[in-house]
Image (spheres, rainbow, N blue to C red):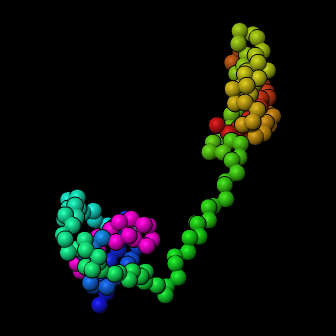
Amino acid sequence: MDIVFNCPNCDQELAVDQTGAGTQIECPACGQHITIPASGKVTTGSLPSAPQAPPPAASPIASSAGAKVVLHLKVPVHDTPAESLIGKTKPPLEVVQKGAGKRLRSHSIRHASCIENGHDLFDEKVSEFLQEVTETNIVSIHTIGYEHFDVGIQKILTDYGVLVIYRG
Ligand SMILES: [Zn+2]
């Protein structure tokens, strides 16, 4: 009858003849010196609570060549194929588009609202706004016409302006 246990170092499943219980062996998988448990199916994953007691001083019997237990260590062969190590396919990198993540906005600048103290600041205001938005965020610029009531001359005037569609 075999004792089946896992190497505490590399977790390799090992089977060894019951006569080997309690003896130290060299793991065939990782080469670590391990002690064969008295019974099989050692729980894996939990570390021993206390450091393994040092092997008792070799008794005269154990150290004698005649008492040496010859172990036939074997690694059980599993029928199931090893878990494939195919890495998860990463989704293609999203092309970062300029202005991505920004909202589409509109801003209109009316010519009439750019007159300050008799000075026509329309071009200046438009330039200022475009500078602020920056060229890469500008989607389109449209001219607009509108009518407004001029309080000064008490007349309805047709005026112009621009409508800027941008991302921001
Ligand atoms: Zn091992």
- Pick whichever, 96 or 124, lies toward us: 96
Question: Residue 139 in the image: x percent, y percent?
Answer: 75, 40
- Provide the residue span drawn in magenta: 25-40
Q: Would you say 17 lies left or right of 162 here?
A: left
Q: Is residue 30 magenta?
A: yes
Residue 70, compared with residue 63, is above or below; it is: below
Which quarter of the rendering shows the C terminus? top right
- Pick whichever, 28 or 90, lies toward us: 28
Question: Residue 134 in the image: x percent, y percent?
Answer: 72, 30
Residue drawn at 58 percent across, 66 percent down: 88
Q: Is residue 11 visible?
A: no
Numbered disc total: 0
Q: Quadrant of residue 37?
A: bottom left
Q: Is residue 120 magenta?
A: no
Residue 23, compared with residue 142, is above or below; it is: below
Residue drawn at 46 percent across, 85 percent down: 78
Considering the whole magenta stretch, tell me its main secondary structure: loop
Question: Residue 151 in the image: x percent, y percent?
Answer: 69, 18
Q: Quadrant of residue 56?
A: bottom left
Residue 39, compared with residue 153, is above or below; it is: below
Which quarter of the rendering shows the N terminus? bottom left
